[in-house]
Amino acid sequence: MKKYVKYLIVVLIIVIISMYLKNKLSDYEYINIENNIQNNREVIDENEFIKIHIIGEVKNSGVIELKVGSRVADAIEKAGGTTEMADVSKVNLACVLSDGEKLYIPNINEENNVLENELKPNKTNINISSKEELIKLNGIGDSTAEAIIDYRNKNGKFLKIEDLKNVPGIGDSKFEKIKNYICVK
């Protein structure tokens, strides 16, 4: 009987210690989660706004500040809207803007060849693009998009588009397919 009581006491002590440690670990995880949330907020606060240069057929040309994730339509609105001579059919109003971009709103009387330099297809900024945006590039699938993001998170921003070849899964042929559709800013 004494052995039974000793085992019971040992089991109770183990249970009590386990419960104590579980509560301490839970508190630590909660504090760690709170710290991560706070750190993420600080990063988001620093990068909450972008600046773009909008010109052409808008009421107020110039540099404007927009929230990250803003679209061309938001920029036009912030610039006071378009003039009566604007041809927004030549502009992708749903395009997401990135910091430092120049946006041109053409005139209805301009011919396409005059606008050739201003209406280049929007390039994907590989330094800020989401997985979904990267997948839209020819030859980039889920795993390659994730590899690009992982590489970017570990090594910092790409300095030039050729740095993309350092990402596992992107060789010369894949790079050649996408090089005209990507940029770094």
Image (cartoon, rainbow, N blue to C red):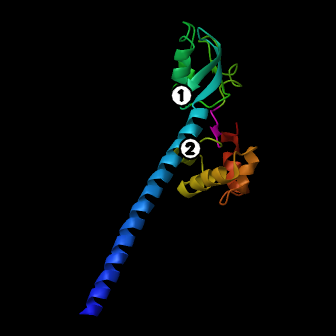
Badge 2 density bin: few <14, some 14–19, many ≥20, Cα 10 Å: few
Quadrant placement of the C terminus: top right
For disc 2, the marked residue is 39
State which tag comes first along the sequence, 2 or 1. 2
Q: Nearer the viewer, residue 41 or 75?
A: 41
Q: From the viewer's perspective, is the residue at label 2 or at label 1 nearer? A: 2
- Residue 104, image quadrant: top right
The residue drawn where x is 43% and y is 56% is: 27
Q: Residue 4 location in percent, x, y?
A: 26, 90
Q: CA distance from mark 2 to mark 1?
A: 23 Å
Badge 1 density bin: few <14, some 14–19, many ≥20, Cα 10 Å: some
Q: Nearer the viewer, residue 153 or 165?
A: 153
Instruction: Tell me: residue 14, above or below residue 41.
Output: below
Name of the residue lying farthest toward the top: 84
For disc 1, the marked residue is 70
Q: Nearer the viewer, residue 178 or 2?
A: 2
Q: Residue 98, labelled with which disc? A: none
Q: Secondary structure at mark 1?
A: loop
Relative horizontal placement of residue 124, taking residue 7 as reference (left or right): right
Most common secondary structure along the magenta stretch:
loop
The residue drawn where x is 66% and y is 46% is: 178
Q: Residue 125 location in percent, x, y?
A: 64, 39
Instruction: Tell me: residue 175, above or below residue 169.
Output: above
Instruction: Tell me: residue 156, above or below residue 50.
Output: below
Q: Residue 180 location in percent, x, y?
A: 69, 41
Q: Is residue 99 magenta?
A: no
The residue drawn where x is 56% and y is 37% is: 44
Q: Secondary structure at mark 2?
A: helix
The residue drawn where x is 53% and y is 55% is: 142
Q: Is residue 122 magenta?
A: yes
Quadrant placement of the N terminus: bottom left
Q: Which residues are magenta?
A: 121-126
